[in-house]
Image (cartoon, helix red, strand yellow):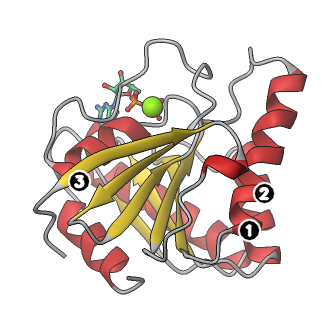
Amino acid sequence: MKITSVNFVKSAAKLSQIPTDDRAQIAFAGRSNVGKSSLMNALFNRKKLVLVSATPGKTRLLNFFLVNDRHYFVDLPGYGYAKVPKKMQENWQRLVEGYFLNTEQLRCVVVLIDIRHDLQKSDLQLLQWLAAHEMDTVVVGTKADKLSGQKLTVQLARNREKLAEIGIATLVPFSAITGAGKIELLKVLEAYL
Ligand SMILES: Nc1nc2c(ncn2[C@@H]2O[C@H](COP(=O)(O)OP(=O)(O)O)[C@@H](O)[C@H]2O)c(=O)[nH]1
Ligand SMILES: [Mg+2]
C-alpha cells in the first residue's frame, strides 16, 4: 500500500460523532507515550499531522484521518497512563469499546507495544478483550531503534511467544526514527483493506 494523500477529517468525543460512511477503518491503539503519533506520522510521511503529545493521557478523542480518499486511519486515545484518574480510564474504556463493538467498517486494530519491554498489564487487557471479541489484531513493537540487533531479536521472540498464547500471530518491529518496519506494516494493513 502506498499512501499518497492524508487528510484530517474530524475528532470524535462520543460514538455519535464517528463517521458513518462505508469506508473501511483501521484503528491504532497503545499506551500513552508508546509512539502512536510518531508511527502514524511516519506512515503518513508527515512530520506533525498527528500531534505528538506533550501531556500523555490528555487526549480523549478518536481522530479520523482519511487516507488516499478511501480509508480511515483512526488514532485512538492512549491508555494505561498511571496518573489518569479512574473515572477517565472508565470513560476511555466505554468510548473505545463502544467504537470497537459498533463500527462495522472497522477491519483491524493495530496495537502498539514498546518493544523494549514485555507486554504490560494494560496491553494484555486490551489484547485479550480484542481476542475475546474475535477482532483482527496486528501488534507493532515501537522504538525498535533503541535496541541492538541481538536484544531486538530476543524481545521479539519473547513477545511473539506471549502473543501467540492469545492467538495473535503478527508482531511487526517498527521505528519512527529510522523508518524500519514501515513498508512491512503497510503491507500487512493493505491485506485488511
Ligand atoms: N527512539 C524512538 N523514539 C520514539 C519513537 N517513536 C516515538 N518516540 C518518542 O516517544 C515519545 C512519545 O511519542 P508519541 O508519538 O507522542 O507517543 P504517543 O503518546 O503514543 O502518541 C516522544 O518523545 C517520541 O519522540 C521511535 O520509534 N524511536
Ligand atoms: Mg499521541
Q: Are marks 2 and 1 in contact (CB under 8 Å)?
A: yes
In the rendered structure, which disc, 2 or 3, sits on the residue that comes first in sequence? 3
Question: What residue do we see at 67% from left, 77% from top?
Answer: 135
As drawn, the label of residue 166 is none
Question: What residue do we see at 31% from left, 80% from top?
Answer: 190
Q: Which residue is mark 2?
A: 98
Q: How many marks?
A: 3
Question: What residue do we see at 55% from left, 42% from top?
Answer: 117
Which amino acid, by three-letter code, is at mark 2?
A: Gly
User: Residue 23 sits in which quadrant?
Assistant: bottom left
Question: What residue do we see at 27% from left, 61% from top?
Answer: 67
Residue 91 at what x, y percent from top left?
82, 35
Q: Which residue is mark 3?
A: 43
Q: Are marks 3 and 1 in contact (CB under 8 Å)?
A: no
Q: Residues within 10 Å of mark 3 (few under 14, many from 20)?
A: some
Quadrant (top left/top right/bottom left/bottom right) for the C terminus: bottom left
Q: Mark 2 and mark 1: span between their CA atoms?
A: 6 Å
- Helix, strand or loop for disc 3: helix
Which of 11/38 is in front? 11
Q: Mark 2 and mark 3: span between their CA atoms?
A: 26 Å
Seen in the picture, residue 33 relative to 116 is either above or below; the reply is above
Q: Which residue is mark 1?
A: 102
Quadrant (top left/top right/bottom left/bottom right) for the N terminus: bottom left
The single residue placed furthest to the bottom in the displayed view is: 191
Which amino acid, by three-letter code, is at mark 1?
A: Asn
Q: Give left or right: position of 47 versus 111.
A: left
Q: Residues within 10 Å of mark 1 (few under 14, many from 20)?
A: few
- Say if disc 2 is inside 8 Å of ligand 2: no
In the rendered structure, which disc, 3 or 1, sits on the residue that comes first in sequence? 3
> Quarter of the picture for ligand 2?
top left
